[in-house]
Amino acid sequence: MVLMSEDFGADVRLVAFMQYSRVVVVTALASLVAHFGSHHAVLPVAEVDWWTLKSPLNAGVTLLLAGGGAALARRFEIPGGGMWLPMLLAIVLPALGLFQVELPSLLLGLAYALIGWSIGLRFNRASLLYAWRVLPVVLGAILALVVVGGLHALVLSRWVGFDVLTSYLATSPGGADSVAVIAATSAVDAGFVMAMQMARFIMVLLAGPAVSRWVASRDPRPL
């Protein structure tokens, strides 16, 4: 959403503030639910190996897909395509058995840092004051999302048969990477949790441009 917002001329700083506030609140609540809702021992987390490459060829092809997909998105002016087009290729091509995606941990960390810096350095005093003023509204919207997700979890648990913790993590409103860490260290069906999270993520990516365009066309205020 942060990357896509820039394509539509929105204020990237405020979008980032809202999105990352959501991630922090939802992740903290999900961690507490997993801690107090699980009756099993917490599973150990594997240490990150920053330097090892299992297959330099796969890593090279992955980087080529990322760069090539982003270049195609820019060439054909696809909103948000710099993110979802490489991801789509990285799903389809391995499914065809052509190669396996490999993301070097060091490069992944640097990418997260660059995105954070590119957004954070745009903040100024005025935008920070505005973010502080709208914080209660943002928190209210986040809590509403959490409640809706919790209700979905209860329905899913009752009608599908998954335990409540698995259902809660599966319907938690983001982010998928944070939920993946919690699911991997909890006694839940991690496969089902990530399938639901990725389905939500892909649906948001596909519907996001159309919804953003519709909202922007009906907002009388200048961006």
Image (tube, rainbow, N blue to C red):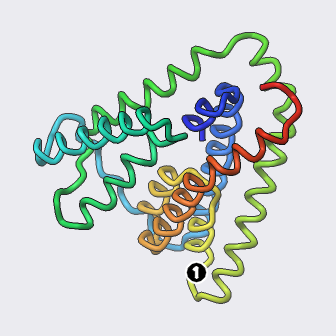
Q: Quadrant of residue 74?
A: top left
Q: Nearer the viewer, residue 130 or 166?
A: 130
Image quadrant for the N terminus?
Answer: top right
- Give the residue at x 43% y 39%: 73
- Give the percent coordinates (x, y) of residue 6: 60, 30
Q: Nearer the viewer, residue 57 or 164?
A: 57
Q: Residue at x 43, y 24 (%)?
A: 114
Image height of 200 relative to 217, above or below: below
Residue 143 picture location, percent across and down: 79, 52
Mark 1 — residue?
163
User: At 47% across and 73% down in the image, what residue appears?
Assistant: 192
Q: Quadrant of residue 17?
A: top right
Badge 1 marks a residue whose secondary structure is loop
Left or right for 67, reference 80: left
Out of 150 and 212, give the one closest to the viewer. 212
Q: Residue furthest top?
A: 125
Q: Amino acid at mark 1?
A: Asp
State which quarter of the image contains the C terminus.
top right
Q: Residues within 10 Å of mark 1 (few under 14, many from 20)?
A: some
